[in-house]
Amino acid sequence: MEPREIFLGALKREATARPAKGSATSVVTVDLMDKVGAHFPEAHLDEEKMARLASAGHTQIGFDNVMPLFGVCTESAALGVEVDWGQVDVMPTCRRPLYGIEDEVVIPENLLTRPSCRAALRALELLKKWHGEEVALVGKVFGPWTLGYHVFGVEEFLVNTLLKPDAVKHAMATLKEVTVRFGLAQLEAGADALCLADHATRDVCSPGAYDAFLFEIHQEMVERLPCPLILHICGDTSDRIPRIRETGLDCFHFDSKVPAAVARERAGEALALMGGTSNLEVIRKGTPERIRQDVRDKVEHAVDIIGPECAVPLDSPFQNMKTLADEVEAYSDVRP
Ligand SMILES: [Zn+2]
């Protein structure tokens, strides 16, 4: 089985020759950038550098997928939010919000040809050419909750989920169209699957708020984005995994704050699981023995795609992810 088949099979919880290995979020580190000669911040806006760096997720680390959208500001920059593209060792951030909650969000006609979106779409086309049928190509879109943080500011957005919930819902209904448009364009550019990142963590979004603001939108994404969809939410999400599984999403990319046993128990049989490996304890400072233990824990609890919980810290040694990927190979054909 090619890595692509294993990865896409694992997203559907089909029987595969071994567990899949990879990530729906960035696996870029400074030493990986040095290794392939493509660096941040240029690699956020230059399609060739972006594709070369994403490619290293397979060629250098050994993961079954590649994913070229490293930061969180691609769509927001195209919407007009001022972005600080960061440094070689600093991820991009949105500088200041664009709107107040009652302002009407305007989606530019040329959203997809603005520099940040255009670079990502072209990088996906390049990766499709380079890796074709062999490696799974994962794209990434942000859902309207995270886009809300960027265009309104986190505080303005969150306060108004309580004070002006109708204004928040109206804004999210507009912003979700950005998610759909960019997602469909990524599929057209060659993506096999999409990461839907929507940062509705328990500390900022109660289970009631997940139901009120997001459940139906996540269901709608399943209908409108015709591909395997991987929902990524950081932090402790154990209380909402049963609801996530009811959305019809294919896979949940979970944080190490949720133990793998809990994640599997709440996800049931239909929802595939990805990640759950601690970035700080395992990816950044894990010994080979610690990494081996972690892989064993994930295999035992039927995590379908093994890898980091979220975008890896830029100062991690990429060798640790290679060790993890090699370790997963040891489980070839022994999966129940
Ligand atoms: Zn995350």
Image (cartoon, rainbow, N blue to C red):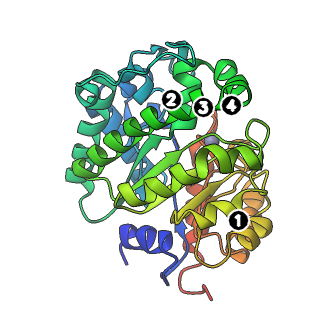
Q: Quadrant of the C terminus?
A: bottom right
**Is residue 171 depicted above or below 226 in this figure?**
above
Sequence-first tag of 2 and 4: 4
Sequence-first tag of 3 and 2: 3
Q: Is residue 209 left or right of residue 257?
A: left
Mark 2 and mark 4: Cα distance apart in space: 11 Å
Task: Using the rendered view, name the quadrant where residue 52 is placed.
Answer: top left
- x%, y% of residue 89? 56, 23
**Which quarter is ligand 1 in?**
top right
Sequence-first tag of 3 and 1: 3
Mark 3 and mark 2: Cα distance apart in space: 9 Å
Mark 4 and mark 1: Cα distance apart in space: 23 Å
Sequence-first tag of 4 and 1: 4
Q: Is residue 68 left or right of residue 87?
A: left
Give the labeled residue for mark 4: 161
Mark 3 and mark 1: Cα distance apart in space: 26 Å
Q: Secondary structure at mark 1?
A: helix
Residue that appears at 51% across and 32% down: 170
In the image shown, does 248 or 54 lie closer to the viewer? Answer: 248
Residue that appears at 68% across and 31% down: 161
Q: Amino acid at mark 2?
A: Ala
Give the labeled residue for mark 2: 171
Disc 4 residue: CB within 8 Å of ligand 1:
no
Sequence-first tag of 3 and 4: 4
